[in-house]
Amino acid sequence: MKNIIKLPLLALFVLAFSDSVAQVNPAHWKFNVKELSATEVELQFQLALDDGWHIYSQKSDPNGPIPSEYTFEENANYKRVGGVTEPKPHEEFDDVFKCTVRSFSGKVTFRQKIKRNTDKAFEVKGSMYYQLCNDGSCIAPDDVPFTFKVPAAKAESEEIVAENTDSVATAAVADTTVKSETAPAAEIAAAKPETEQPEKQKSLLGLFFGALLAGIVTMFTPCVFPMIPMTVNFFMHGSDNKRKNRRQALFFGFSIIFMFAVLGAILTLFLGPESLNVIGTHGIPNLIFFIIFFVFALSFFGLFEIKMPEKWVNASDAQADKGGLLAPFFIALTTVLVSFSCTGPIIGAALVELATSTTNRWISLVSMLGFGIGFALPFTLLAFFPSVLKNMKSGGWLNSVKIVFAFLELAFGLKFLQMADLYWGWRILDREIYLALWIVIFTLMGIYLLGKLKFKGDEDVQHIGVIRLFLSIASLSFAVYMVPGLWGAPLNGISGFLPPMHTQDFNIEKIVVDNKGAAVSAVSYDGIPADRKYADKLHEPLGYKGFFDIEEAKAYARQTGKPIFIDFTGINCNNCRKMEQYVLSNDEVKKYMNDNYVLCELYCDMNDIDLPESEWVKDGERTIKTLGRRNLFMQRTLYNMNAQPYYVIIDADGNSLTKENFSYNPDPAKFLEFLKEGTTNFAQK
């Protein structure tokens, strides 16, 4: 009996092992169609990932891994309602990318709502573009087609699984077609996210207070906290009519709640949840936010006083009894818009659920209402009692608070400017320039707190209080902490606020590594042309020189009589960067590689680099026209592998020189053995 059990287990083990040395297919897709009404349909992308694998969110940081994309073919039979929505991703700061990475693992469902333009059955076609990674490798993205068969309209709402079982797919990004495979019903049922549980199991009151707390906590985020002095400054310059001021303060608070709970939901329903991210990441809004912060900073420093136009003030006074509420509404609008960079990730999950669910709308609305109240409450209280601050004149402390906030407004305003700078690629506010400005700002703020700088309205500082002393210590210490960043130190504590490392012009680590690499093997670089293909857009690991086109590498290998080391990599491949950091940067590995090999870096995800027509490749019915897809096609067809990093050693004729190729293994000793095997076999030819 034991042997009978062991045989099928052994067979499964053999099958699993044989798959592991071939192309990796960790993503198992199934496409369902759910009827919402006679006119609306929900398309469900149900994904089950193998253990250890993850897919990246559509909202990935621009400096991080490649985000997922969904492209739909135009069809007169339907109209998309918003974009493809996703549940809340797992968020984790990545030391390699130096940013927050958002991903999904296990089983997850993505959704697209469409509106029927016909009662007849039709198909929705398109393609997915995504990157998959685990702890050892990544799969470069490629276009994976999908097809939804939408049945004829039903009179009553009911869930219908797409009739064609061939729409149930086990897909790898390297495949050119979606493979047909029927998945067990239990697996697909389990693929539904937990958010689809009946709302009765969830406490609306608990959700409300949780969202309320989240809204209050948001007050202490860097793009919300500096808005406090702007708000107080406006209401402190109001009229002496307390009734009017309090009415405006209440309307100010209700305006904030309205914008979060209602306008945010409208944006999601009609433009998709990604519309909130546009506000936080697009160049134009960030430039506007910088101007707002900069103008208020100048005002707080005493250069001028911000006042409403006289005509507006007179009109507001004339309508005091009628409720002159235009000004507080626009102050509330500015507060909400500027805060989106920090509040967007917090409220995104609730808005996504609101846009995609028919059974959980109350949950989302209650969450948004609680968040809006929590966010508006501190602002409203400050606006309701500005006279308390206005009447506290002793010691000139209020002017000192205003000056400190002016420094903070200036510092945090630069973050919005650098976001616009990155978006348009100006390269005005590179990392070291940004850090230099922050160092000067926080140094001056520390000196001011010590009473060594004076601004308009300041009184002489006779002695330093304990609070003021500790604030000065904190400010000056923070400035000192940032100094090493001018020479390339990562500054992990504030890396989320800084421009990416690649914008740093002077990086001492890069200079040392480059010079060290040139010193150990300067002769290896002789003869490598400076105008080699794609050298202006792609890079080698620090301390290396090589090629980005296999034909150029082969020609140089024939000229020098060396074997070729092929590195199948990716610009957004996390594990590729780890191999560069832990293995390729090793002194012994670097010297051996530079002395004995011709390096060829083949990027499998550079699909924004178009190939000339003479280099296009046919892959079945598809024509490959980009560098990344061609390199991935080469890896798949020649080596039956689609994951990166992946290392191959060949001669100039393309013959493999090692028994096995090398994948992710951050052990320099093992990697060095692989390199030596290649040179030994090459010498014996």
Image (tube, helix red, strand yellow):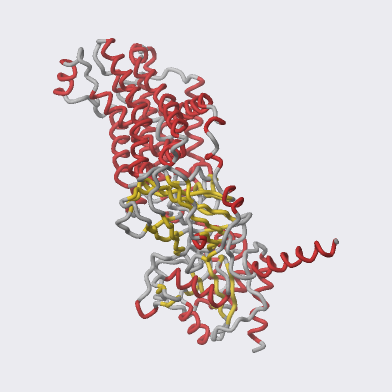
Residue 140 percent location from the top left of the image: 50, 64
Looking at the image, the residue that sits furthest to the bottom is 685
Residue 651 percent location from the top left of the image: 57, 83
Q: Is residue 377 above or below residue 155?
A: above
User: Is 602 in front, or is 106?
Assistant: 106
Residue 498 percent location from the top left of the image: 44, 46
Q: Is residue 253 above or below residue 574?
A: above
Looking at the image, the residue that sits furthest to the right is 1
Residue at coordinates 46% horizontally, 80% vertically from top-left?
Answer: 552
User: Is 579 in front, or is 479?
Assistant: 579
User: Would residue 333 appear left or right of 635 to someone viewing this image?
Assistant: left
Looking at the image, the residue that sits furthest to the front is 155
Residue 652 percent location from the top left of the image: 54, 85
Q: Quadrant of the C terminus?
A: bottom right
In which quadrant of the rendered view does residue 386 lie?
A: top left
Residue at coordinates 44% horizontally, 59% vertically from top-left?
Answer: 128
Q: Is residue 193 above or below residue 370?
A: below
Q: Tell me if residue 432 can be seen.
A: no
Q: Is residue 595 above or below residue 26?
A: below
Q: Tell me if residue 181 can be seen.
A: yes
Q: Quadrant of the N terminus?
A: bottom right
Residue at coordinates 30% horizontally, 19% vertically from top-left?
Answer: 235
Residue at coordinates 52% horizontally, 32% vertically from top-left?
Answer: 199
